[in-house]
Image (tube, grey):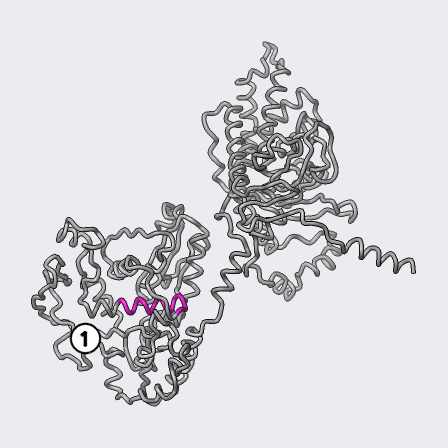
Amino acid sequence: MITLGHEFISPNETFPCTDELLAESADHSTEVDASHYAVVHGALPRLSNNVLSQHRWLSEEWSSLLGLGPHLPPEPVRVIRTRTRSTNSLDPNELALKVADLVSNALMSKLGAMGITLDLMANLAQHQPSPVDPVPHLANGDAPPLSFSTLGATIRERSSSISASPVDLRGSVHEFEATPTSQTSQSSGIPEIYFPGQHKRRISEIACTQEPARSKKRICRPTLRSAASKEWTSGLSGAYAYGNDLDDETSSQSSVQYDEDAVEDLLSENSPPTIADSWESNPSGDVLVTCNVLQFPLTEAATLRENIRWAMKVLLGNPAAQEKSEAQMMGILIVMRGRQDAMITMRTGGGKSMLWQVPVLLNSKLRFIVICPFAVLLEEQCEKAEKAKIKAINYGQSRVIHPDVQILFAQVEHVGSQPFME
Amino acid sequence: MIWELQQFASSLAYGQLKDPDVFVDPQYAWISIHGKTLHLERLRRGMQDLLREVKDSFIVLSGDAAWPAPHDNPIVENLSNTQRGYCFLEEVPFCERKHDLFLSTVEKHKLGTWTPAGTCIWNELAIRKFLDRADAVWGHLIHALYVGLQLSIRVTQLLQLQIRNADRPRNFVFQGKECMVINRYSKTTNAKGKDGCIPAFLSAALTEIFLVLLGSGFREAQALLAGVVYGSEARWHYRTYVFIGFGFLSSRFLIYVSSDIFVSSAERGSSQMISMTGCRKETNSGSAVGGGRVSSARV
């Protein structure tokens, strides 16, 4: 028993040493109980609730180890610790990004107040490590990904009017014509894209220009270039960087305003073809192929994919992170598109969790209900989401669901219950 | 000088290491204890088998078609009630139906007949057979408790586990849908002159089974029938303690713990068997309450 306990059961941070602190300050610690109240009243000090909780936890762990639940049998402690150590090792790229983050934050706060905007994103994009060689600069002994010399070259002033207008940091302002014209598909089998309120409305032009269009709807889509960008984090992924400021979608110091609604329009309102549409268009094809989630024009899809990849980098803390497979990427695109039913099956370890984590980072208005049959897996996913500063809640642990909660994790048993339905 | 030599000799004696007795598979699939192999998968499968055995044997004995539905309403037990004889079975609704199973059992198993004068003529042979089979139901559960509770497995300690308040407060406490087992008597009780108070919680599966066996009146039926064949003291024992066999406090139940389903097939049939927790026990027959761990118990 003891050996199994050593190997499989390890306390986490569930029981910090706060058991006696409050009691001690209230003069009701176990020690005071034993020395004072027991003497005065002839009573024995009682087991504290925290002690019961600890033993309940231990009992649950032991029962789980025996296969009696409530969790799956735990992994050996040594395996967990070995994995944790390997993932906690210092990554030069991660360090470089953190330094860039610190530098950019400091400069932004100082220069932003003076009306000077630092276009860090462009620099970060230029120095973005390729997936093949994640640390080319450090490995070759060249300059680090960000240097003050390169930063200084990109400092430019922007007028307040310009900064108030929606401008893509990368300079990619996507324009849609109010009256779209017909677009010739590269392949006749590719279905057309539909816009709300119109029939067979097509995107006529996707232009990348710095110039504001007059009678055209402008959508600013800042590209997630780096976690170091405060503009980005304050606008697009507020849930990640500012977990307490979910409603604050614009930053007062930011020179860029992010139109999240516009992205929503792009992803859902402008509803590109659904799976059903695709089936109709090409009933003989495979679902994933005929679905063809990348019905956005090429540049748009590329931008969205780039955003998704950068969200993955932020989530995983790995600058070399990218999608595990095309299926994962397509799944995320389907989820982000929304308003269409989809059943996505992926193998174990295929990266299904990214399907709800990435969209939340890219669009803080999205809400997810994640149903998982295994309590352990569910808790793990909830912890991961919380680590990513996503407002997630485990329904099995708390029934109080704040409207700001972005991901609600629930077990299968909970879903059928009346309280959950309510 | 003598003191120092004693210290030195002790340090030599106690500091000397022996070969390891426990070896854990690097892949964590099995553990070797005293040369016997404990496969974790077999352990888990064995626990499931035990629970199934309890349910199946109870269904057969009770004559019902299926395992009773678990008690849905949360149990509120008076934790501060230390009155002798008290347990949660004294609370509503358990107290209202505690004789239901007894009456049906007497009828189904033909344990007695009523005379026109209103007295009951008991069939002692049938009662003894019924009690034996009922003990077997509890035996499987106790085996599961033996492993499922992470409490000490000393025989004397297990035998002292109480359902009701007696010389000591009860060990099994139900609150809500949880069953908490408070370990009181321990090997340090006599040395310290006081009991411990170590809580442990039964898993939901074990709690459900335990609650059904107690709450359905199964134990009460055992107690009443044991009173017929073994006397009134046996009746009190059945109502108070968990480890009851043949009407008295007995380590007889530990024979169930000797199951070798968790030992590798090569070990099957060995007279020296290893329990799931790694404690050896002798399978030769014996009697009475033993001291120390299971290994020293003569069953």
Residue at image mark 1:
A218
Q: Which chain carries label 1?
A: A
Q: Give the range drawn in magenta.
A: A305-318
Q: Element type at marker 1?
A: strand
View extreme (right): residue: B1
Examine the rendering and report whether any part of residue B93 can be seen: no
View extreme (left): residue: A182
Q: Please tell me whether residue A94 belongs to the stretch shown in magenta.
A: no
A8, above or below B34, in the image = below
Q: In which quarter of the image is residue B274?
A: top right
Q: In which quarter of the image is residue B89?
A: top right
B133, above or below A246, in the image = above
View extreme (top): residue: B116
Question: From the viewer's perspective, is B143 left or right of A359?
Answer: right
Location of residue A247 in the rendering, given as x and y in whole percent from the top left corner = 34, 70
Q: Residue placed at 33% from the left, 58% from the top?
A: A368
Location of residue B209 in the rendering, given as x and y in whole percent from the top left corner = 53, 35
- Pick whichever, B120 or A357, lies toward us: A357
Question: From the viewer's perspective, is A136 left or right of B217?
Answer: left
- Pick whichever, A135 or B285, lies toward us: A135
